[in-house]
Image (cartoon, coloured by chain):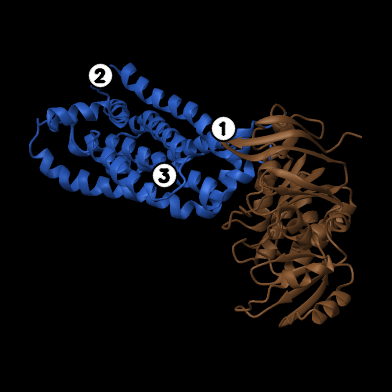
Amino acid sequence: MTPVVEARGLTKRFGSFTAVDAIDVEVAPGEAFGFLGPNGAGKTSAMRMIGAVSPVTAGHLRVLGMDPDTQGAQLRARLGVVPQEDALDQELTVAENLAIYGRYFDLPRRVIRERIDELLEFVQLYERRSAQVDPLSGGMKRRVVIARALINDPEVLLLDEPTTGLDPQARHVLWDRLFRLKQRGITLLLTTHYMDEAEQLCDRLVVMDRGRIVAEGAPSQLIRQHATREVVELRFPPDSEVDVAALLAPTGHRIEVLPDRTLVYADDGDALVREAHERGVEPTAVLTRRSGLEDVFLRLTGRQLVE
Amino acid sequence: MATPIALRVLEGHARSYRHTWRGTTIGAIVTPVLFLAAMGLGLGQLVDADRGGPIGEVGYLAWLTPGLLAASAMQAGAADGTFPVLGGTRWVKTYHTAVASPVRPRDLHLGNLLWATIRISVIGTVFVVVAAAFGAVPLHRGLLALGPAVLTGVAFCAVLSAGVVLLVRDQFLAGLNRFVVVPLFLFSGTFFPVEQLPPAAAAVARVLPLWHGVELTRALALGTQPAMAWQLHLGVVVLLLVAGVAVGARTFDRRLRP
């Protein structure tokens, strides 16, 4: 089967700045694939090249077997795009926003009418079809944007930070819809700087930092490879002079001293807490949690994902 | 058969216009009519008391009407080359979404120009009909004069959108109106012949594309000869349009496909 995305040495430069630095990516049909990384890591630039809206500076890129630089319009006809900003015309109704976009694909008006009904049903906004966009909540607008991206019945959906700025409940509604699309066989490509989003949605992901891919795999696999099963978070008073790293060094666990807390990576968190206590470490707060992609990122780059 | 892409963009303009026409069109029609009443009828009486002055034998109202027609078309074109483009690139960012579909940046440019052509034609037609009702111009001559007036408006739209698409700040907008649109409107032979200006300023005015549009429009409205060969006047306006389309194809691409 032709891969949905096949990139080798894919590079994007703006002047002397290298936004995407020779990355290799392969995405299979039906996969949910994520680009995870902090702002400025090159995720959006990579997505824009894949979406055929930004020319490739160097390297090889095929999307659905096509060359985005020479077959751009043909390729874009088969993609759906959810951009970072909604870009909905606030003065128009929900249905009109979708209709105008549908005409960009030269879809017959009758097909557009049918699809608008179906899609608004799908994103649970059917009753708002004739309402203006302006007064809708952020989560609702996001769902309109997803409906708009699906108007051409795309095989691949590109989502750039799909839930940034939404409240937890709205995010869950959105994730649920995206999960259904995946079940229908639509390939999902998304960028995110949220670990929970990547863990929820992605079968596989690449961790990007400064234009490069620093790790690749399934979320659980990356966590197994680059972190322990559990993490203990220790907090101390702001003026504390205790050198935790030195006190805990003999335990042999990996320690990350962050500005607001200290992380200790251990497979058995409770045992570590007892041991720390015996060694005279007296934190004001202790939290034992399962490790996640956040910890993977910290391990790989020495920096936090969301600062 | 596939619909040409610029026409699909044009259709989008038409759809959203249903919600915005009051704000954008009424002003574009009312303002020139107010000018026509105040200047043509009011000021015109003073001017006409001195028959045989710089505007010749024709009454001031008749002389002013084609000038206002062309200058208002330029103003409408300037607006269409500014606000929809900034909406697309910066305020609502619909252009960025559009280019993720089969629509290309140059289709957005052309679609906007086609839309401007329709809008300026409608505004101009209403103005001509009102002016004819005032007795300022015979209706058939006024409709004939619409041609160069609309062409002038569209040419300005093309050139302005080609530049405005690259803007990353809005502060340029006020300056554009104050230092480009209004001076052009006032000093391009709209309200008085450019010969009335000091010689150096008159020479500048004759280089301005709006003056050439005004001369063509006035010649058709009054059935007189333009100041220079009509081919030259037409050439200047067409050149402005062609340059706007060609440069816009590049600047739209540079902005929307970085």
- Horizontal side, residue B219 vs residue B84: left or right: left
Question: Which of labels 1 and 3 is toward the front?
Answer: 1
**Disc 2 to disc 3, how far (Cα)?**
29 Å
- Corner quadrant of residue B126: top left
Marked residue chain, label 3: B
Among the chains pictured, the one given brown colouring is A
**Relative to A302, is A73 above or below?**
above
Name the element at disc 3: helix
Residue ID for mark 3: B79
Question: For the point 18% across and 29% down, which residue is it?
Answer: B202
Q: Which mark is residue A295?
A: none
- The residue type indicated by label 3 comes to Ala
Determine whether label 1 and label 3 are within 8 Å by CB. no
Q: Earlier in the sequence, mark 2 or mark 3?
A: 3
- The residue type indicated by label 2 comes to Met
Among the chains pictured, the one given blue colouring is B
Marked residue chain, label 1: B
Q: Earlier in the sequence, mark 1 or mark 3?
A: 3
Let me know if marks 1 and 3 both belong to one chain: yes
Crowding near pointer 3: few (<14 within 10 Å), some, many (20+)? many
